Amino acid sequence: MINVTKSYMGNLEKFKAYVDGIYASRWLTNQGPLCCELEERLKDYLDVRNIVVVSNGTMALQVAYRALGLTGSAVTTPFSFVATSSTLQWEHIRPVFADICPDTWNLDPARIEASLQEDTGAIVATHVFGNPCAVDEIDTVAQRHKLKVIYDGAHAFGVQQAGQSVLNRGHVTTLSFHATKLFHTIEGGAIVTNDDDLAERVRLMTNFGIADYETIEGLGTNAKLNEFSAAMGLCILDDIELILEQRAEIAHFYTRHLGDYLQLQRVAPDSEPNFSYFPVALANHRAMLSARAALQAADINPRRYFYPSLDTIDYLQPQQAQPISRGLAQRVLCLPIYPGLGRNIQQRIVDTLLRQCDSPLLPLAPLRRAL
Ligand SMILES: *Cc1c(COP(=O)(O)O)cnc(C)c1O
């Protein structure tokens, strides 16, 4: 079975050399040398002012909300991985959804104000599939209502917009370095911010609030990254250009062959994407199910990212229904994309999908109309 992704492993000899070092020093966690080296190299590569690596992308979101002192409610996107809103609920911040743009699939800045509550303190938006949000428009709304802006940048590793790292936008951007992500540390994540004081608070919070052996500065938790994970990250970072190149090649192949038949995400025109995912939207729910069945019969396992639309989750009720997100969540499949995915498999995926488009049940026309 060909899955939607395959974890990138990096060079084993290099990883073993790092492990030898860890065995020699017995420094396994707590701001070890590999963790510090990874932070330095990521700061440089991502072109950001402050980056704190953490144990996973979910803790990155939770610590970010805490460090910003968020309470009350936050306006957020219904079309994302569940962690974007579950972390809010976990921190006793009520997620209130606003719908997405039908073409970019990101939080629609024009819909935020209608969702604002008396107690709204923040906007939490995802650069979904690595596509930068309408950051300028979101800034304008945030400034008008004195809201904090948190970007869930779990998909946006290395994404540039107008020649700048999109990770520098908002008060905080969080990253996930989970094994399935473009760049990973097995489990891991990071918090990025331009605000030096905030970065300092984040550092304390991720280590129990401990400032030194005898000083506890405030409430904290444990969100530290361990040295084995940092070693994996260092190995993978060495190969990042190759990873991006190979992903781009696959994405271009899919776009060339499927772009006329399936709806693709409209990517911000001045952005440099990272091809972390390759989502396609079928004409309707039935067409999506049928395309998925055809792919599965051909030993291809696409994923329904992101289903269900988060506004339908039981524990987040009551919510206003978000029809654009619900509709899209019924139609999207993410196709396999990862370094090493053979051209023959890519061709099989394209052929299978194009045959669907030609089937009498799903004629080409409705698919084209979906564009
Ligand atoms: C993966 C992901 C997360 C969670 O990251 P973990 O490292 O798995 O905790 C959060 N948000 C989005 C959008 C993600 O894709």
Image (tube, grey):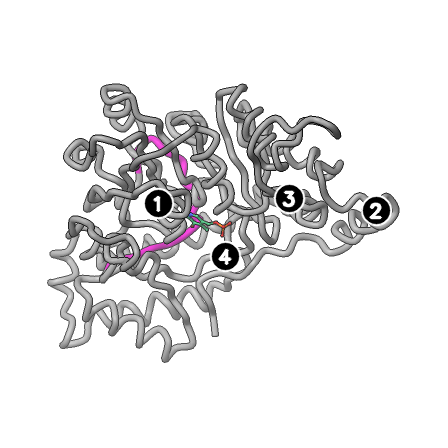
Coordinates of residue 240 in the picture (x, y in percent): 58, 43
Cα–Cα gap, marks 4 and 2? 34 Å
Q: Amino acid at mark 2?
A: Arg
Number of the label disc, if any, that sits on residue 26: 2
Residue depth check, mark 3 versus mark 4: number of the one nearer the observer: 3
301 over 179 or under it: above or below? below
Residue at horizontal 12 percent and vertical 62 percent from the top = 366
Q: Amino acid at mark 3?
A: Leu
Number of dots carrying numbers: 4
Tag 4 residue: 338
Q: Amino acid at mark 4?
A: Tyr
Tag 1 residue: 128
SS of the residue under disc 4: loop
SS of the residue under disc 1: helix
Residue at horizontal 50 percent and vertical 62 percent from the top = 341
Q: Amino acid at mark 1?
A: Val
Q: Around disc 4, counting alpha carbons within 10 Å, would you say few (fewer than 14), some (14 to 19), or many (20 or more)?
A: many
Cα–Cα gap, marks 4 and 1? 18 Å
Tag 3 residue: 225
Residues shaded magenta: 268-281
Q: Nearer the viewer, residue 288 or 354?
A: 288
First of labels 3, 2 by sequence position: 2
